[in-house]
Image (cartoon, grey):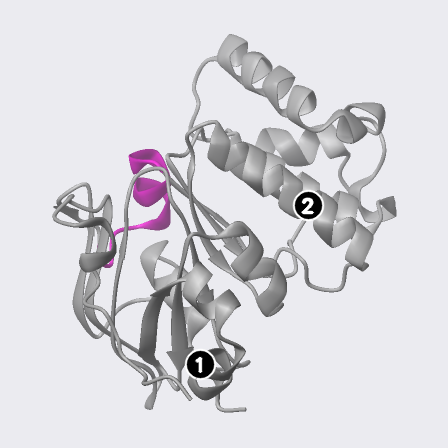
Amino acid sequence: MSTITMDAPDTALGMVEPVLRVRDLHVSYGSTAALHGISLDVHAGETVALIGANGAGKSTTLRAISGLLKTRSGSIAWNGTSIANRPPEEIVAAGIAHCPEERHVWPGMTVEENIALGAYLCRSKDEVRTRMGMAFHRFPRLRERARQLAGTLSGGEQQMLAIARALMSEPRLLMLDEPSLGLSPRMAEEVFEVVRAINAHGVTVLLVEQNIHNALAVASRAYVVKTGRIAAARPTADLRGDPELLKAYLGG
């Protein structure tokens, strides 16, 4: 079996400064420690995946970055500026959007109303309409269902709705938490085609994904998270090409 090594966070892209730099991040839920010194980098234009077992700390990492959880110690820098423990709305305004696990759409509101919620920091009605038009251009299926209640959509359509809502803030970094959760393989692939297209248009992506195949197919680099720590940082090509290495990182 291949020797397990862990690259330093910056080595994958040389000395280029990352847009997101997380160092020695510790987060607790009450008296229970959830993250034990997470460090990671994300560079502009990348899609980076966090992979690992349920409960490893992947979603907690995203929630700490987006300001939904307070950090106990460590640092989070966005374009060189500290954002640790800043209010979530300030982090959204800085250019980071978080599409949460299980989507959290408002079932009793229409598709159009749900999407508009993502532009709550935008003060111009004309700009909201422009962004809404772009959302419907990206997601033609949602345009067809604009007046339909979100609760009547399929799981895949609700995931697209959640992504469209997140994109209304025009983020430079989109964080996606389990976008294929509960979806059929066909619908999951459709959602990941959307993720690829978003990244191709210049949006950096940080992805948490339980389906290892999907994560490694869409990302260029991956961090393996185990019990609140980074166990490995590797190009996804290495992990795809060495199943034994991936099995070692993930513990079987």
Front residue (pair 30, 48): 48
Q: Amino acid at mark 1?
A: Leu
Residue 110 percent across, percent down from the top left:
77, 34
Residue plotted at (15% across, 44% down): 17
Front residue (pair 67, 171): 171
Mark 2 and mark 1: Cα distance apart in space: 28 Å
Q: Quadrant of residue 97?
A: top left
Q: Which residues are magenta?
A: 84-95
In the picture of the structure, the residue carrying the numbered disc 1 is: 245
In the picture of the structure, the residue carrying the numbered disc 2 is: 191
* Quadrant that contains the N terminus: bottom left
Residue plotted at (62% across, 67% down): 211
Q: Residues within 10 Å of mark 1 (few under 14, many from 20)?
A: some
Local SS, label 2: helix
- Would you say 242 lies left or right of 141 here? left
- Would you say 44 lies left or right of 122 here? left
Front residue (pair 113, 232): 232
- Would you say 154 lies left or right of 228 here? right
Q: Is residue 180 above or below residue 26?
A: above
Q: Is residue 106 visible?
A: no
Residue 137 percent across, percent down from the top left:
67, 19
Q: Is residue 124 above or below residue 10?
A: above
The question of residue 216 being in magenta is answered with no
Residue plotted at (36% across, 49% down): 88
Labels 2 & 1 near each other (Cβ < 8 A): no
Local SS, label 1: helix
Residue plotted at (41% across, 29% down): 202
Labels 2, 1: front one: 1
